[in-house]
Amino acid sequence: MGIRRILSYVLLAMITAMAVLYFMGHREEFHIIGTVSVGAVALLSVLQLFSGIFYGLQLKILTDHYKLNLNFFQWYGLIRATSFANLWLPFAAGASVKAIYLKKIHNLDYSSFIALTAVMNIIKFMVNSLFACILLLVTIRSAPLFLFAISFFIFAATFVFILLAHRISSRFLPSWDFVKKVEEEWRDIRKNRAAVVKLILVSCFLFLFSSAQVYVAFRAFSFDLSFLTGGIISAFTTITGAIALIPGNFGIREAIIVSISGIDGMGVNEGIHAAALIRITGIVWTLLLSSFSWYKFLDTQEDVPSSKPRRNMTREGEAERPGDRDH
C-alpha cells in the first residue's frame, strides 16, 4: 500500500474520530433529525438521481470523442461503479475503474482517458469557480473575502488554460508526461467544439442540481439557507470533490457545508444535519443503484467482442497503422 493511501486512511480515521466525539458531546442536539421533511428527502433523492445521470453524460461525451458509442447501461453502469469505488477508496479511485474497463474492453489507452478526464475537470473547475465568483459578489457583505480570492484564482488559472494551453509549445511545458498529455488532449478536443460546449453545459446543470441539493437539505429541517449560499457551497464541494484526498471526500465536504453555511447564520449543528442528510441519501442510492446497474452493465458486455485483442483506437475510431504512436 502506497504512502499516499496510508496517509489518506489515517486522515479518514482522524476525521471519523472527530465526528464521533462531536456526536457524543452534542447528542442532545441531534433530536432535530426527527423533524426532517419526507417530501424534502424525496426531492433530494430525485436531484441526486438526476446528478448521477448527468455525470454519466459527461462520460458519454468523453467516450464519444473516441467513437466508442457506449450504450446507456454501459456509461451509466460505469458511473455507478465509480460512485461505489469512491465511497471506499481515496484519490478518486473510480476514475481508475473507468480507465481499466475502457482499456480492457475498448482498447482505449489509460493515459489518454485519464488526461481527457483531467481536461473535463479543468472545465468543471472553471464553471464552478465562475459561479462561485458571481454568487460571492452578490453576497459580498456577508461572505469572507478569502473565498472570493480562492474562486477567482481557480477561475483565472483554468480560463487561461482553456484560452492559451493549445498555443504553448510543448517544449515550454514542465517535463512531466502527464502535463504534456493533458495539453495534448486539450489540443485535440478543442477542435470538437460541440463536445466542449456539451461539457460546459453539463457542468452548469450539475452545478444547479448540486446547489438545489444543498438548499433542499437545509430546508428539510426548516433551516433558512438561501439558494445563493447553497450555490457557493456547491461550487466548493464540487472542486474539492474532484481532488478526493480521502474516500468519499468524507469530512471535507461536511466541513465546507458547515463553514460556508455560516454566511446565512447557520450554526455547526444545522450544517451537520444538512450535510449528514446529503451524505446518507447519497450512500443509500449509490448502494441501491450500483448492484442493479452493475448487473445490467455486465449483461451488455455479451455484445462486446473482447475475446480477441484489438489494436488501440485513434480518436476518430480507426485502428492505428503500424508505426502510429500510442494514445
Image: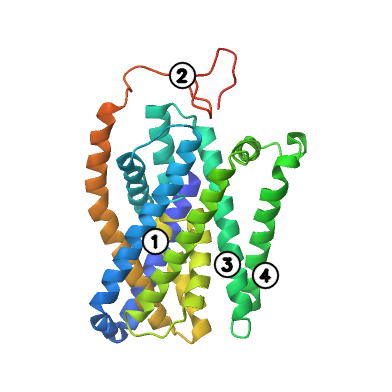
- The amino acid beneath tag 4 is Ala
Query: In the image, what residue occupies the spot 62% across and 38% down?
Result: 191
Determine which of the numbered discs, if any, sits on residue 149 in the image: 4
Per the image, the residue denoted by label 1 is 13
Helix, strand or loop for disc 4: helix
Say above or below: 214 vs 177.
below
Calculate the distance from the C-alpha at mark 1 to the C-alpha at mark 3. 33 Å
Would you say the residues marked 3 and 2 are in contact, meaning their CB atoms lie under 8 Å apart? Answer: no
Helix, strand or loop for disc 1: helix
Q: Nearer the viewer, mark 2 or mark 1?
A: 2
- The amino acid beneath tag 3 is Phe
Q: Nearer the viewer, mark 1 or mark 4?
A: 4
Q: Which quarter of the picture shows residue 279?
A: bottom left
Helix, strand or loop for disc 3: helix
- The amino acid beneath tag 1 is Ala
Instruction: Report the quarter where the N terminus lies.
Output: top left
Residue 19 locus on image (x, y percent) = 37, 71
Calculate the distance from the C-alpha at mark 2 to the C-alpha at mark 1. 44 Å
| Frontmost residue, 275 versus 208 | 208
Residue 124 locus on image (x, y percent) = 54, 55
Query: In the image, what residue occupies the spot 59% across and 81% down?
Result: 139
Say above or below: 165 vs 237.
above
User: Nearer the N terminus, badge 2 or badge 4?
Assistant: 4
| Frontmost residue, 83 versus 58 | 58
- Residue 251 seen in render: no
Q: Which quarter of the picture shows residue 321?
A: top right
User: Nearer the N terminus, badge 3 or badge 4?
Assistant: 3
Per the image, the residue denoted by label 2 is 311
Per the image, the residue denoted by label 3 is 131
Calculate the distance from the C-alpha at mark 2 to the C-alpha at mark 4. 47 Å
